Amino acid sequence: MYADRISDMNPQLGRKYAFMALLIIHSINLLADKIDPGGWDKIKWGMTLDAVADIYKGGAYRIAPSDPTYPNKLSINGIKIDFLDVQATVQANEQSHTVYSVALELPESSAFKRARSGRDIAFAKLRDLLIAKYGPPDSDHIYQDSTSATMSDVLWAFQSTSVKLSRRESAMADVGYVMVVYQKLEKNPL
């Protein structure tokens, strides 16, 4: 009703209000489509490693801490993402013992990891699957680091989770990796 009165007084102002209302509704719909994963697969932020191990019975095992600063890790083998075999490394906070990160990578035994052409295929497939699941990425960068290695980072950011697809290819040899990291975002980072 109020918009009708405004458009009666000034038709251009009424159209501006209608356009702004449509823009707000469209923005809300876009935000609603971007659903925060809150973890990865059945793993949710705040779970303990024991709870994760119970979910993936038989496929999960504790990683012996080689670095004392990262003692709380669990590995899950035998994961299939489309045609790719991957392994997950789940990391928990040392004080709270709750999960804050899940890294997915190709196992050493994977033919897709051993050759650049395989990593090309794996990166492209994972990128396509993540875009299909989460929509266009928030950032997508290809750059070279100080050793002239080619780096590719594709990032999706949500309220509590970041999803980062990374790839690194050595300039000197056929060595590289493809990895997807789901990371819990802190609410108050400062």
Image (spheres, grey):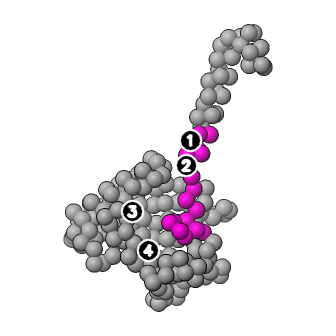
- How packed mark 3 is, by other alpha carbons closer than 10 Å (few <14, some 14-19, many 20 or more), is many
Residue at image position (68%, 11%) is: 11
Q: Secondary structure at mark 1?
A: helix
Mark 3: which secondary structure? strand
Write the residue at 49% across / 71% down.
102
Amino acid at the residue labelled 2: Lys
**Mark 1 in CB contact with mark 2 (< 8 angstroms):** yes
Q: Position of residue 165 (x, y in %)?
A: 41, 61
Q: Which mark is residue 34?
A: 2
- Left or right, 176 with respect to 163, comes to left
Q: CA distance from mark 3 to mark 4?
A: 15 Å
Residue 59, visible in the rendered structure:
yes
Q: Position of residue 13 (x, y in %)?
A: 69, 16
Where is residue 63 drawn, in percent x and y? 46, 86
Q: Magenta segment: does it hold 33?
A: yes
Marks 3 & 4, CB-CB < 8 Å contact: no
Q: Are marks 3 and 2 in contact (CB under 8 Å)?
A: no
Q: Secondary structure beneath disc 4?
A: strand
Alpha carbon separation for disc pair 3 and 2: 21 Å
> What's the residue type where badge 4 is placed?
Ala
The residue labelled by disc 4 is 88
Circles 3 and 1 in contact, beta carbons < 8 Å: no
Q: Which mark is residue 166?
A: 3
Quarter in which the N terminus is drawn: top right
Residues in magenta? 28-45
Mark 4 to mark 2 CA distance (whole Å): 24 Å
Q: Amino acid at mark 1?
A: Leu
Tag 2's secondary structure? loop
Residue 172 visible in the picture:
no
The residue that disc 1 covers is: 30
Q: Amino acid at mark 3?
A: Ser
